[in-house]
Image (spheres, rainbow, N blue to C red):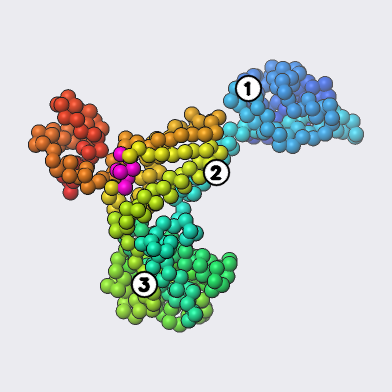
Amino acid sequence: MSLLSDKFPNLSIFEEILDDIDEGINVADNNGILVYANRTSAAYCNAKREEMIGRSIEQYYPSAMMLEVMRTHKAIYNRRIHFIGEKRYMCSSFPIFENGEFLGAFSIFRDVRQIEELDYQVKLLQQKLHLNTPETDVNDLIGFQYGGTLSKVYQKAKRTVGSLGGPRHSIITGESGTGKTMLAGLIYEYAKTVGVIEKNAPFIEVNCAQFSNPDIAAMEIFGSEEGAYTGSKSKKGLFEQASGGILFLDEAHALNHYQNMLLKAIESGEIRRIGGTKAIPIDVIIIAASTQKLEDVFLPELYQRLAQYEMHLPALKERSMEEKEVLLRHFVRRYEDSVQQFHQITCNISLTAAAKHALLQAEYPRNIRQFRDVINSSIDAACPLLEDVKDRKNLEVLVSLENIPFATETAEDIEAGKKLSDAARTLILQMAEQSLGPRKISKQLLEHDIDLPYYKVAYFLKNHKA
């Protein structure tokens, strides 16, 4: 089977084990002759294991780390080796001594391509999170500076935790994507700055709409004791986790099943876990956020307790064109910074006049979040793939109209759709019934001498369905 049993009898019992592991293993005598190679090693060098035994390690691994170990008699740990073609592996090599006599060496190595791919995916995920994470620095937030649309909102937000009378509970309302979570985060950061809460105080966020079962919601928020229900264990709820900090109740209009429990906790400063009898003191600042008018949803007493300060965030369409332009530049710059941070590429992004006009004039039902996502998608479409820019340090990117997702519709586009000829309308609807998408419809319309971009076809179909 191998010379391992002959040269190193004490290791013979491990041969089967060594054959079944993912790492490649080679063992050579003091002349560099292979006495053992497991299946993984043979696969690495595209050889048969039986042929390898008795031959020099250099024949199969010309740059084998083991050769250095044989010269120095010293171990080498975790050195990355680049091998033939795309194969890359991490290798460690160790000398073998018996009674002070040097007998040879062995190496253990593993393909690092999977590790590198995992690192790459983690890096992309980190970049995505970086692009989508709400800002926590007011200096980076458009509209919060003095004179901006949200400057009065931010001043009011600071008073919720910065007033001399002590911190207050508060309510934030606004359409989806207007920045309610971001504002709650700013309140949290400001509270730490002025010393209302500790620097390491918790910020616990929960989306109340995620709970379809009110009993589960109550246990998550208030905790549970062992035996409260079959299989239950003692568990801290969100109130206890948030004690000393802020509990952010997003989509708070979904609290209808346990408003009384929440009101009691606010009034008494104590909670009881589900199934428990012990009163547990809590010190929590509550911020409730909703897309609905909470005064119409909450119990009057609960609304009164939470709405000591109520802040409303305007929709993107209510903000000035100047602020929209600043927002656009902000998200473009953030994309550039992300490329530099995660790929070490200086990326200069510019937009054509038509692309800029379309982005600024579009309607965004999901507000700033959608505006940001559309900008990122447009830049993605204009940028080359990572595999095409491996060795480049500088990149010029021009975003044109064709890079913008057709989900962004402008008033001009809608009006253009209304002005389509009856013939064009009929053709579009006929093709749509054949399950053709906007791009194919646009191409086929050219055969009828109708030049209509695919995104305008999409606008027409969307408005026709509406």
Task: Considering the whole magenta stretch, tell me its main secondary structure.
Answer: helix
Dot in front, 3 or 1? 3
Q: How far apart are marks 2 and 3 (CA)?
A: 38 Å
Residue type at mark 1 is: Ile
Q: Which of the pair 383/346 is nearer the observer?
A: 346
Residue 48 in view here: yes
Labels 3 and 1: the sequence-earlier one = 1
Please name the residue shown 75% across and 28% down the image.
65
Reply above or below: 190 against 261: above
Q: In which quarter of the image is the N terminus?
A: top right
Q: Distance between the residues labelled 3 and 1?
A: 65 Å
The magenta stretch is: 354-360
Tell me, for residue 84, which label it has, or none: 1
Tell me, for residue 341, which label it has, or none: 2
Labels 2 and 3: the sequence-earlier one = 3
Please name the residue shown 38% across and 41% down the image.
377
* Residue linked to disc 3: 310
Please name the residue shown 28% across and 47% down the image.
361
Residue type at mark 2 is: Gln
Residue 5 locus on image (x, y percent): 78, 27
Residue 209 in view here: no
Q: Which of the pair 345/323 is nearer the observer?
A: 323
Labels 2 and 1: the sequence-earlier one = 1
Dot in front, 2 or 1? 2
Task: Please tell me in which quadrant of the rendered image residue 213 appears.
Answer: bottom left
SS label for mark 2: helix
Residue 445 is covered by the magenta coloring: no
Q: How many marks?
A: 3
Please name the residue shown 29% across and 58% down the image.
318
Task: Please tell me in which quadrant of the rendered image residue 69 appears.
Answer: top right
